[in-house]
Amino acid sequence: MPSAPDPARCPVSVTADPRRVTVEPQGPALVEGPVEVVLDDGTVARSDRFMVAVCTCRRSRTYPWCDTSHRRRERGGPPPEDRNPR
Ligand code: FES
């Protein structure tokens, strides 16, 4: 069970409105912007969009932002029907 953030350790004001995050199955986390993401190397990526799709699959060429590369995983189903039937 998640607990309330420790105000002494949390860099975000606990009085601010909660930021809503929607996690898409097999897809990105949709976060109300603006958003700053701290990357593995410590650099910070920022987006000022109203809604930001943060990549959770790490396949994006624009990581940390989703570029829909996660959808490629869903391929592999049955081949498309013959479009030129005889
Ligand atoms: S979640 Fe969309 S590219 Fe990773």
Image (tube, helix red, strand yellow):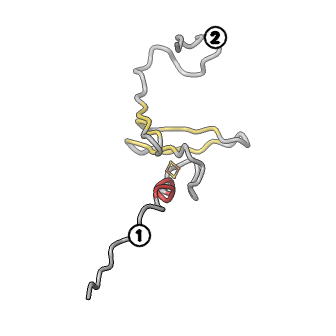
Distance in Å between CA atoms under marks 2 and 1: 56 Å
Q: Position of residue 22 (x, y in %)?
A: 41, 34
| Residue located 47% across and 39% down the image | 29
Quadrant of the rendered structure where residue 21 is?
top left
Up the image or down, 13 lies above or below 83; here it is above
| Residue located 50% across and 38% down the image | 35
| Residue located 58% across and 39% down the image | 37
Q: Nearer the viewer, residue 15 or 86?
A: 86
- The numbered mark at residue 41 is none
Q: Quadrant of the C terminus?
A: bottom left
State the residue lying farthest toward the left. 86
- Asked which secondary structure carries label 2, the reply is loop
Residue indicated by mark 2: 8
The earlier-in-sequence mark between 2 and 1 is 2
State the residue lying farthest toward the bottom. 86
Disc 1 crowd, CA 10 A, few/some/many (<14, 14-19, 20+) = few
- Looking at the image, residue 82 sits to the left or right of residue 62; the answer is left
Front label number (2 vs 1): 1
